[in-house]
Amino acid sequence: MGSISNTEENTDAILAVTPAGDFNPPLAPFGERVSWALYDFANTVFSMNIATLYFAAWLRGSERNRVCACRCIDSCFRRNF
């Protein structure tokens, strides 16, 4: 059975420690950071579209949708003691 030992060191990862005791891991390549930034931006835009545009249109769509939304909100904030 394998075990983790403190004596084994990974020489591939280089971590620098500042005088304040903070770790400074090496930065990812520039292209990788840009791709993650674009991915995060796209997720933010998508979620804001759903929350503001489509959910509002769904609420205005019919009385049944408004009643359903009100019941869902009530059930989230109702305290059962």
Image (tube, rainbow, N blue to C red):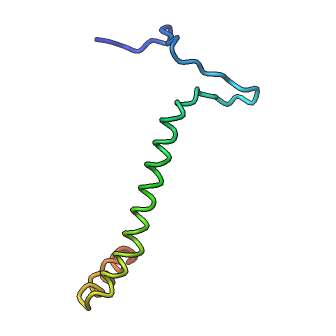
**What residue occupies the far top of the structure in this picture?**
7
Q: Work out whether residue 77 or residue 38 is closer to the camera in this orientation and state it.
A: 38
Number of marks present in the image shown: 0
Q: Spot the residue most to the left.
A: 64
| Image location (x, y in percent) of residue 5 | 45, 12
Quarter of the image with the N terminus in it: top left
Which residue occupies the extreme right position in the image? 19
Question: Which of the 4 quarters of the picture holds residue 55?
Answer: bottom left
Q: Position of residue 4 (x, y in %)?
A: 41, 15
Name the quarter where the C terminus is drawn: bottom left
Q: Residue at x 51, y 41 (%)?
A: 34
Residue, far bottom: 63
Q: Residue at x 70, y 28 (%)?
A: 21
Residue 53 placement (x, y as % from top left): 39, 75
- Who's the residue at 25% across and 89% down the image? 62
Q: Is residue 19 above or below residue 64?
A: above
Residue drawn at x 52%, y 30% is: 29
Taking the image as shown, residue 26 lies to the left or right of residue 65, namely right
Vertical order, 44 against 68 (above or below): above
Q: Nearer the viewer, residue 70 or 42?
A: 42
Q: Position of residue 41 (x, y in %)?
A: 47, 54
Q: Is residue 7 above or below residue 42?
A: above
